Amino acid sequence: MAIDLEKLMRLDMGYPGLSFGYHSWALGAYLDSLEQFVSFAQEQYRLRAKCDLEKRKDEYEPEQYAQEEGLIDEAADEHIPRYARMLNCIQN
């Protein structure tokens, strides 16, 4: 969706209920909190998954164990942020 610069320039910033400064601050604060949530979720997932994996360490060969650790890291680095942001888009 292209932004029409001419319409944007004619936007009445004095319209009641429209305050670009406050809205942009709120959006920035929301995005910051979302990023903090993603970081926290990644950390917690790694901690929980690796603890569970450690409990079953004797079930795996060393190569398999390393592969499982790699899958945990991949999920934390790629899938959790994508999932959290996707949920954010669905809710809004």
Image (spheres, helix red, strand yellow):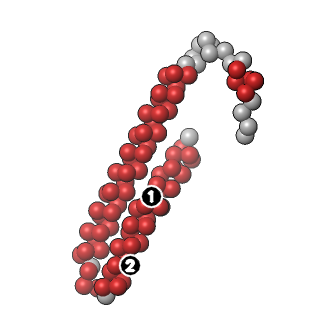
The residue shown at (52%, 28%) is 24
Looking at this view, name the residue that lies furthest to the bottom: 61
Residue at image mark 1: 80
Is residue 60 among what the camera can see? Answer: no
N-terminal of the two: label 2 or label 1?
Answer: 2
Nearer-the-camera pick, 87 or 42: 42
SS at circle 2: helix
Residue marked by disc 2: 67
| Horizontal and vertical percent position of residue 36 | 38, 45
The quadrant in which residue 32 appears is top left
Alpha-carbon span between mark 2 and mark 1: 19 Å
Other residues around mark 1 within 10 Å, as few (<14) / some (14–19) / many (≥20): some
Q: Is mark 1 on a helix, strand or loop?
A: helix
Residue at 73% of width from left, 27% of height from top? 5
Tell me the kind of residue under disc 2: Gln
Q: Position of residue 51 (x, y in %)?
A: 26, 68
Q: Residue at x 43, y 61 (%)?
A: 77
Residue 71 coordinates in the image, percent (x, y): 41, 72
